């Protein structure tokens, strides 16, 4: 299928050109804003030769094409009215969402960045419990004292972290948001709370509340602050704006936070904690069964983030969670079992590789998106097996009142988060719950079966029963083995293009990269705003919005570097290109200069995926993650 045919098919399956409100493209994907998203035929779009994947995200329907996207965009643009297409990076109107979806979106944006800190602190609490349980430490030991407050610090100062992530979400000055959070946690305020003597501000009685470890109050405060800051921006004279604007914000928001919003949010949070505790005690087995079974569906919609404040509140209030986070244990292990069963039963080599990789990721890290999107939802029947296994294991977890003591996504390596010296049998119950979910899902998937999508290029009606079809869904029909044979004899190093910390792609808040739809690679959290060439080769693609670049090495390795998440919306602000497409470059040559501070202040995540877009041409792509790296350090090995 040539590009003009592909363009026609894409337009047809998004509901026709009359359904397209606007279209732009970034480094890897077409970004449609549609009038009616229900008209999209997602299944057919994903089957089109030349389409890597598709997803609805950020109010846009995004179709992943890869390096060929400018040419496909040009063909699609020919079929649309001129006013429908926009220069790359132009801001698009977002899809309207109802109140509930907007709340989920806010919680997702504000909670996700702080989860690593909560997980680290939670595991430290578990470690302290383990040391006490084994007799290595005693509560009166000084080491115990220090480790305890090390772990508690994250929860105590939680409003500070939420102020920062909320500021990024609501596009307010992060330092002003931190200043207001500081007022709510100031020692003089906590002293007033401890004294419990009535006080008033401006003649209005003040509700004395301890805001440490709270979630909801600061998020509401920063949301309201976004309106106050915009008002202050308008009324502040230019000459004195530098101090007059923040003065207005603090003078307005401090009383509002302490007199009204803070107490309201605090009582909402407390009510949430009490409600969860009541459910756990009265109908825990039923609630856990439902949550455990249908958790994958919540993850698919993003609604699982709505439960995060409840988990944090429960752990901060009672020291554990017995509902929301516990349900993830059953869901994660049931998805793992389904993936491993698919890997055994399928005759599709590609699906077997995806199933093994997704199952292993779910088992060891608790990251389930690859298992959900890449395997169980794609094949349908394994999803049914996973739901049934989750329901049954959830019933057991509810009956034994299973508890988790850390804010983590449960996995094999994180099972110690169920250890507690106060609940000695809890850890054993966690192992039993996980085993029920994994084994039952594995067996049910084998019994129920599924339809293989593709077996060596052929469709099949049932796993292991191919028909006579000859259709291939790939961009080209050349077997991977033929491509890999060329490169199998040597290892090609890809050097770091940035200074910073190398992390797994799952840390990127964009499923196109985190699910490896564009190819394997690694992500870097940059510490300096200069991107250099990771290989000796040629600049093959450079976006007009300056945030992404592709370089092909002299050996043929295609390396895509995408500075930040969704930064196409910056329209080139804070980026400067230092090369042009077609330029020859060597390792260490500067490619793009960018401002980390200004990009982050604009509300964007600066994490930078480094992707080998022609991964399928090689035996494997191995990244060196979880380490500090500098330009010139070996980042990726291509085999």
Image (cartoon, helix red, strand yellow):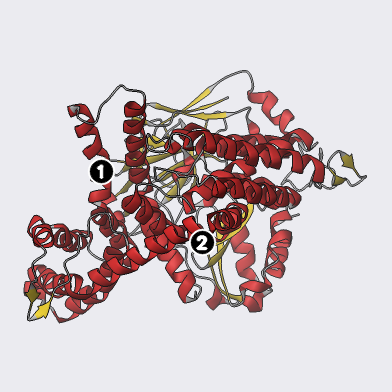
Residue that badge 2 annotates: 303
Q: Is residue 558 visible?
A: no
Which residue is located at x 63 percent, y 27 percent? 619
Q: Residues within 10 Å of mark 2 (few under 14, many from 20)?
A: some
Contact between marks 1 and 2 (CB within 8 A): the answer is no
Position above or below: 262 against 456 = below
Which residue is located at x 52 percent, y 41 percent? 366
Which residue is located at x 76 percent, y 37 percent? 478
Q: Is residue 198 visible?
A: yes
Q: Position of residue 424 (x, y in %)?
A: 44, 34
Q: Which mark is residue 152?
A: 1
Q: Position of residue 310 (x, y in %)?
A: 40, 58
Q: Residue furthest top?
A: 489
Q: Quadrant of the N terminus?
A: bottom right
Q: Position of residue 140 (x, y in %)?
A: 19, 30
Q: Residues within 10 Å of mark 1 (few under 14, many from 20)?
A: some
Front one among 389 and 584: 389
| Label 2: element kind | helix
Front one among 85 and 352: 352
Q: Which mark is residue 307?
A: none
Position above or below: 300 against 171 = above
Q: Quadrant of the C terminus?
A: top right
Q: Is residue 188 left or right of residue 272?
A: left
């Amino acid at each position: 299928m040539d590009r003009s045919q592909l363009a026609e098919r894409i337009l047809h399956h998004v509901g026709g050109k009359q359904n397209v409100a606007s279209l732009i493209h970034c480094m890897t994907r077409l970004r449609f804003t549609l009038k009616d998203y229900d008209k999209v035929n997602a299944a057919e779009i994903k089957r089109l030769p030349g389409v890597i994947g598709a997803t609805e995200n950020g109010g846009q329907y995004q179709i992943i094409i890869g390096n060929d996207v400018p040419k496909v965009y040009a063909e699609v643009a020919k079929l649309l009215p001129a006013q429908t297409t926009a220069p790359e990076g132009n801001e698009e109107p977002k899809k309207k969402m109802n109140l509930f979806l907007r709340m989920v979106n806010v919680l997702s944006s504000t909670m996700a960045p702080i989860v690593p800190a909560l997980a680290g602190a939670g595991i430290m609490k578990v470690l302290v419990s383990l040391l006490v349980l084994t007799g290595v430490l005693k509560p009166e030991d000084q080491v115990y004292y220090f480790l305890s407050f090390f772990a508690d610090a994250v929860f105590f100062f939680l409003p500070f972290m939420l102020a920062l992530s909320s500021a990024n979400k609501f596009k307010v000055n992060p330092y002003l948001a931190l200043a207001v959070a500081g007022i709510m946690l100031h020692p003089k305020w906590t002293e007033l709370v401890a004294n419990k003597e009535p006080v008033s501000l401006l003649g209005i009685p003040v509700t004395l509340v301890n805001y440490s470890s709270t979630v909801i109050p600061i998020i509401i405060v920063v949301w309201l602050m976004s309106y106050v800051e915009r008002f202050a921006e308008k009324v502040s004279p230019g000459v004195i704006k530098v101090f007059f604007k923040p003065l207005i914000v603090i003078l307005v928001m401090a009383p509002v936070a302490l007199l009204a919003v803070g107490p309201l949010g605090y009582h909402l949070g407390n009510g949430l904690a009490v409600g969860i505790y009541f459910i756990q005690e009265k109908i825990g087995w039923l609630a856990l069964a439902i949550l455990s079974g249908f958790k994958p569906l919540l993850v698919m919609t993003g609604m699982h983030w709505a439960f995060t404040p409840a988990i944090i509140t429960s752990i901060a209030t009672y020291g554990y969670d017995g509902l929301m986070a516990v349900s993830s244990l059953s869901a994660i292990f049931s998805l793992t079992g389904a993936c491993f069963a698919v890997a055994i039963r399928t005759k599709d080599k590609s699906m077997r590789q995806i199933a093994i990789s997704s199952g292993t990721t779910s088992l060891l890290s608790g990251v389930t998106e690859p298992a959900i999107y890449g395997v169980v939802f794609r094949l349908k029947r394994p999803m049914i097996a996973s739901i049934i296994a989750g329901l049954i294991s959830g019933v057991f977890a509810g009956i034994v009142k299973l508890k988790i003591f850390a804010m983590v996504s449960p996995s094999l390596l994180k099972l110690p988060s169920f250890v507690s010296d106060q609940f000695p049998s809890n850890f054993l119950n966690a192992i039993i719950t996980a085993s029920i979910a994994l084994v039952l899902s594995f067996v049910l998937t084998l019994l129920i079966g599924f339809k293989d999508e593709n077996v060596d290029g052929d469709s099949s009606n049932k796993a292991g029963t191919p028909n006579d079809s000859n259709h291939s869904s790939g961009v080209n029909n050349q077997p991977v083995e033929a491509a890999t044979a060329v490169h199998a004899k040597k290892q090609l190093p890809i050097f770091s293009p940035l200074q910073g910390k190398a992390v797994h792609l799952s840390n990127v808040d964009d499923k196109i990269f985190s699910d490896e739809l564009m190819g394997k690679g690694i992500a870097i959290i940059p510490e300096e705003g200069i991107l250099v060439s990771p290989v000796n080769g040629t600049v093959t693609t450079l976006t007009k919005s300056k945030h992404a670049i592709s370089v092909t090495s002299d050996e043929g390795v295609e390396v895509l570097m995408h500075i930040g998440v969704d930064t196409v919306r910056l329209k080139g602000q804070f980026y400067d290109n230092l090369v042009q497409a077609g330029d020859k470059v060597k390792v260490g040559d500067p490619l793009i200069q960018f401002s980390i501070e200004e990009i982050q202040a604009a509300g964007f995540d600066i994490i930078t995926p480094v992707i080998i877009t022609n991964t399928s041409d090689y035996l494997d792509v191995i990244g060196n993650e979880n380490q500090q790296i500098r330009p010139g350090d070996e980042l990726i090995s291509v085999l």
